[in-house]
Amino acid sequence: MGNLKGFFKSGHLPTLISSFLYFDISFMIWVMLGATSTFIVQDFGLSPAEKGLMVGIPILGGSLLRIPMGLLADRYGGKRMGTIGMILTMIPLFWGWLYGNSLTEIQAFGFLLGIAGASFAVALPLASRWYPPEHQGLAMGIAGAGNSGTVLASMFAPRIAEVFGWHGVFGFALIPLAAAFIVFIIFAKDSPDAPKPQKLSEYMGIVKTKETWIFSFFYSLSFGGFVGLTGYLAIFFVDQYGISKVTAGDIVTIIVFAGSFIRPIGGYMADRLGGINLLVILFGMSAAVLGFIGFLPSLYVMITLFIAVMLVFGIANGALFQVIPTRFPKEVGIFTGFVGAAGGLGGFFLPNILGTFKEITGSYSFGFWWIGITYAVALTVLIWLQSSWKKGEKKEQVSTINAV
């Protein structure tokens, strides 16, 4: 309780809330193509592989744009880049609302929806830089809980599409985006303690460290798993169980709710237990649950398993971003952009893996098992990294003692 009191006394709550709202609405828009996918598929008659590609394209766009957005946010300020990002996000929304009459157009404006996904690299550093290291996990977790925008997308998009058509969903999305824009303009502020912008060569220096690539791999599984499943689950449930599109949307809402709002708890748990220790447990659980999912049990058992894996993904997302600002405090913007880009790539590959295996084998089983094996590999790498860090700390202690 005392830890929470200290949290609310430190930092800048209006910026934290504004960052959450900006990320929340942006995330809702980012996954909107997946939320309306069952309606779009009906219009265009896509193959399983084409379905996976369509759902994955906005995630790919977001992953590619996160690095430049993170770099620009560090250099020109998170508030300025967040404002520009929301203005640019209106372009694909208008396109999807008024046009989007071919698969090529859908893929094009879907890629531009990635602008909304790139908000991650702006919102999280903007909020976290107001808080001291001991509260980084909770601050990043609260701002990062903006991925709850997936709940809004899966809850409302199918119902709006049922009444107004899937084009109308993108038109309605302009309303909450405008509201978030106004709140952000009024209340968000850049931290006066933000580190000075570095040269591009200094930013790119993080690419040379093995931790950058390792954390990118980890986040491509935790966040990539979350956002990839969010976009594809409606298609999966309709294909596998033959339920209605709106019912599939309701089920996805329940599932993603679990993973969205648990993220701050993941950050808090990581503050208390240590991010790496927590991740070892979570990655092991992910591999096991995905293995069970691959057996394609009954609908209600499957819902329970997906809720479990989304909870694990959500906690892992919070834990990963507790570790990052403590190890890379000066490069947090570009680091979150780089690692977030990898997370987006994971989210792009996941629906493509499921769709491709479905098309080749006629079943989703092998796709889920393939993904589960990848988590088992990540667990092995994580255990090795933990051991490597402990050895490094012991060497530093010995060097300090000898110097004295």
Image (cartoon, rainbow, N blue to C red):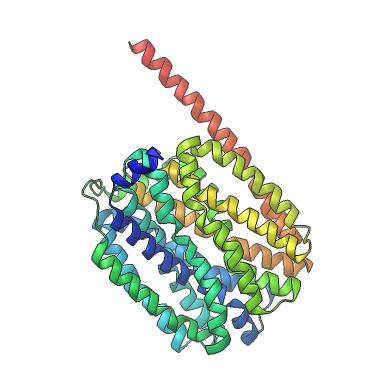
Give the residue displayed 29% in from the left and 58% down from the top: 14
Count the marks: how many?
0
Position of residue 396 relative to residue 33, above or below, is above
Report whether residue 346 is seen: no
Position of residue 380 relative to residue 266, above or below, is above
Residue 72, given in percent of the width and then of the height, sits at 30, 58
Residue 87, given in percent of the width and then of the height, sits at 32, 74
Give the residue displayed 24% in from the left and 66% down from the top: 186
Rendered image quadrant of residue 66? bottom left
Rendered image quadrant of residue 381? top right
Front residue (pair 341, 281): 281
**Left or right placement of residue 297 versus residue 197 in this view:** right
Position of residue 373 relative to residue 184, above or below, is above
Give the residue displayed 34% in from the left and 59% down from the top: 17
Give the residue displayed 38% in from the left and 39% down from the top: 3
Residue 62, given in percent of the width and then of the height, sits at 45, 64
Position of residue 167 relative to residue 239, above or below, is below
**Left or right placement of residue 73 versus residue 262 in this view:** left
Front residue (pair 168, 401): 168
**Left or right placement of residue 190 versus residue 320 in this view:** left
Q: Quadrant of the N terminus?
A: top left
Residue placed furthest toward the left: 192
Residue 387, given in percent of the width and then of the height, sits at 55, 29
Residue placed furthest toward the front: 1
Report whether residue 294 is seen: yes
Q: Quadrant of the C terminus?
A: top left
